[in-house]
Amino acid sequence: MAILTMTTFVSLDGVMQAPGGPGEDTSGGFTHGGWFFPHVDAQFGEFITGIFSRATAFLLGRRTYEIFAGHWPRVTDPQDPVATKLNALPKYVATRTLERVEWNASTIIRDVVPEVRALKRKLDGELQVHGSAGLAQTLLEHGLVDEFNVATVPVVLGKGKRLFGTGTAPLGLELKRARTSAAGVVLATYRPAGAPKVGSFELAP
């Protein structure tokens, strides 16, 4: 059985929209695309390489799939740790609009929740989600994420699609590991840990 891991780049105020470039996702009037790029360094590269080295298959939302499909097939270096995985391994695309997908080893899924549950039972290793803001909300709503890899950048964007959007079910998290890159990016891995624990600083009467 596979675990489902979600890898996300977020601003300090939780925005995950268009980290890689100005034209990546301008929906909602978002004008800060490319906010993550200036913070990429060798330590971030090691973090990402480690994640992709564990991949068995990928689960992507339509927009992320189209961005990846337009870029990674053009990266043909056999030593590239990201391109070699993305170009070769199975890719499952959650979409209601695409009729066909042409990138190698790609399959469309329509009914996300039961089909993802079936994939987790069928596969071994890691079924990895990268980006995919809309898909992420569905997976979170149904408790399908087993691990979060979150790269938090020291920038505040004020608006945009968030990893934990309005209506996200409350969730406690356990920190599995963390470090900070030279560029100030907090590279952390979390596991769900049930409902949030609560307490009080109030003095007893």
Image (cartoon, rainbow, N blue to C red):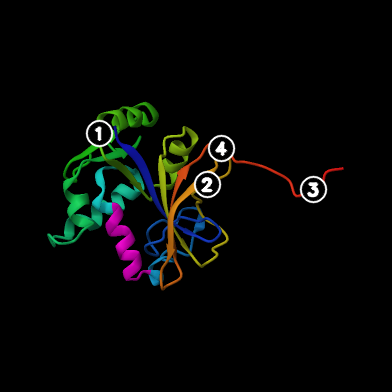
Among numbered discs 3 and 1, the one appearing first in the sequence: 1
Local crowd size for mark 2, using a 10 Å CA cut-off: few (<14), some (14–19), many (≥20): some
What separation in Å lies between label 3 and label 1 (alpha carbons)? Answer: 48 Å
**Which label's residue is closer to the chain start, 3 or 2?**
2
What residue is pinned by disc 4?
169
Measured Cα–Cα span from mark 3 to mark 4: 26 Å
Which of marks 4 and 1 precedes in the sequence?
1
Q: Is residue 89 left or right of residue 95?
A: left
Alpha carbon of mark 2 to alpha carbon of mark 1: how far? 26 Å
**Residue 123, which numbered label?**
1
Q: Which of marks 3 and 4 is in front?
A: 3
In this orientation, which residue lies closer to the viewer: 25 or 126?
Answer: 126
> Alpha carbon of mark 3 to alpha carbon of mark 2: how far?
29 Å
Q: What stretch of residues is rendered in magenta?
A: 40-51
Q: Earlier in the sequence, mark 3 or mark 4?
A: 4
Q: Which amino acid does label 2 sit on?
A: Phe
